[in-house]
Amino acid sequence: MISKQENVGLAVGQVALIDSIYFYIVKFFCMNKIKYIFKILSFILLICCGVFMFVYGGYDDSPGAQGLGLLMFIGGMAGIVKVKKVKSKIERKS
């Protein structure tokens, strides 16, 4: 943000334009990284829960729990691949 001491020689519209550009740059780079990290961590948590459920279902002799654990694991892996694919597509465009 531009403080009042730095805007010597700039019109009010120019200061507002620079502030809005700065806001969108910070929002784009910071928020997208946070969303990306959150998505990856949530899919890793899903994979861990799926592995736990698969092992627990085997211990408890429950094929339904094993099936759900396997589906959770596959869903987590597919989610990570999808997020990485979208991220690489966005990076190639810019």
Image: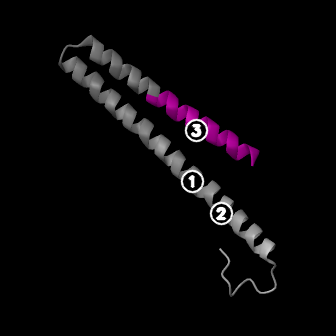
Q: Is residue 54 left or right of residue 61?
A: right
Q: Are marks 3 and 2 in contact (CB under 8 Å)?
A: no
Q: Which residues are magenta?
A: 76-94
The quadrant holding residue 1 is: bottom right
How many angstroms separate mark 3 from mark 2 (CA)? 26 Å
Element carrying mark 1: helix
Write down the quadrant of residue 62 in the picture.
Answer: top left
**Image x and y of residue 86, in percent:** 63, 37
Of the pair 11 and 31, the residue shown nearer to us: 11
Q: Earlier in the sequence, mark 3 or mark 1?
A: 1
Magenta segment, principal secondary structure?
A: helix
Tag 2: Cα neighbours inside 10 Å, few (<14), some, or many (≥20)?
few
Amino acid under label 2? Phe
Residue 74 horizontal/vertical position (percent): 44, 24
Q: Amino acid at mark 3?
A: Lys
- Percent across and percent down for residue 38 are 47, 45
Q: Rate crowding at label 1 as few (under 14), some (14 to 19) or many (20 or more) other CA atoms within 10 Å.
A: few
Q: Does 55 appear above or below 83?
A: above
Considering the numbered disc 2 on the image, is that residue within a helix, a strand or a loop? Answer: helix
**Marks 3 and 1, how far apart in space?**
16 Å
Q: Which residue is mark 3?
A: 84
User: What secondary structure is found at the residue carrying circle 3?
Assistant: helix
